[in-house]
Image: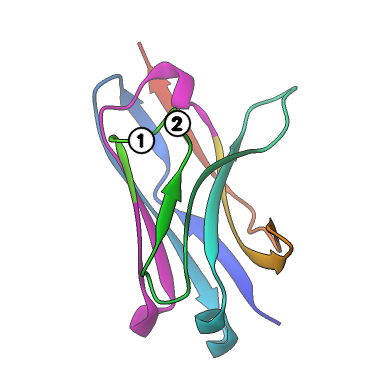
Amino acid sequence: QVQFVESGGGLVQAGGSLRLSCTASGRAYLIYAMAWFRQVPGKDREFVADIRWNGGRTSYADSVKGRFAISRDNAKNTVYLQMNSLKPEDTGIYYCGRALGGGAYGAWGPGTQVTVSS
C-alpha cells in the first residue's frame, strides 16, 4: 500500500514562496495521478492542483493559477508544489493524495501546515 508524507510547510510573509514535497513509499506510486489539496478549519478540503502519472498534464484551481506549479520526479517518488506570490488566503494544511478513480483523490498523507502572514 502506497503511503505519502508531506513536508516543506512553514510560516512565510505575503509575497513569499514555499516548495512543498510529497514523498511516496512504494513503487506503485508511479501509476497514479497525484494531487495537492488544502484545508482550513471549518471548511471542506479544496483542490489545488493535480498532475498525471507521467507529468504530461497538469491542472490548477483558478485561485492559484499563475502562482503555483505542480511537478513530479518519479525517480524520487516525489511530487512537488512550488508556491509563489503567496497570499494570506493560501493559509491552510496542504495534503497530497493519489487518484482513486472517477475523478476522486484520497489516501492522504498527514499534511503540512502553510501559514502566510499579511
Q: Secondary structure at mark 2?
A: loop
Residue lying furthest bottom = 27
Which residues fall within the magenta stretch? 70-92
Q: Is residue 82 magenta?
A: yes
Q: Is residue 67 left or right of residue 52?
A: left
What label sits on residue 65 in the rendered view?
A: 1
Residue 16, quarter of the rendered image: top left
What label sits on residue 62 in the rendered view?
A: 2
Q: Secondary structure at mark 1?
A: loop
Residue beneath the point at 42% across and 17% down: 88
Residue 8: percent from left, percent from top = 39, 49
Q: Is residue 68 magenta?
A: no
Pick the front one: 112 or 54: 54
Residue 60 higher or lower than 67, as above or below: below
Q: Which quadrant of the rendered structure holds the C terminus?
A: top left
Residue 2 higher or lower than 41, as above or below: below
Residue type at mark 1?
A: Lys
Residue 73: percent from left, percent from top = 34, 74
Residue beneath the point at 44% across and 50% down: 59
Q: Which quadrant of the rendered structure holds the N terminus?
A: bottom right
Residue type at mark 2?
A: Asp
Pick the front one: 60 or 112: 60
Q: Is residue 8 left or right of residue 45?
A: left
Residue beneath the point at 53% across and 56% down: 35
Residue 108: percent from left, percent from top = 67, 58
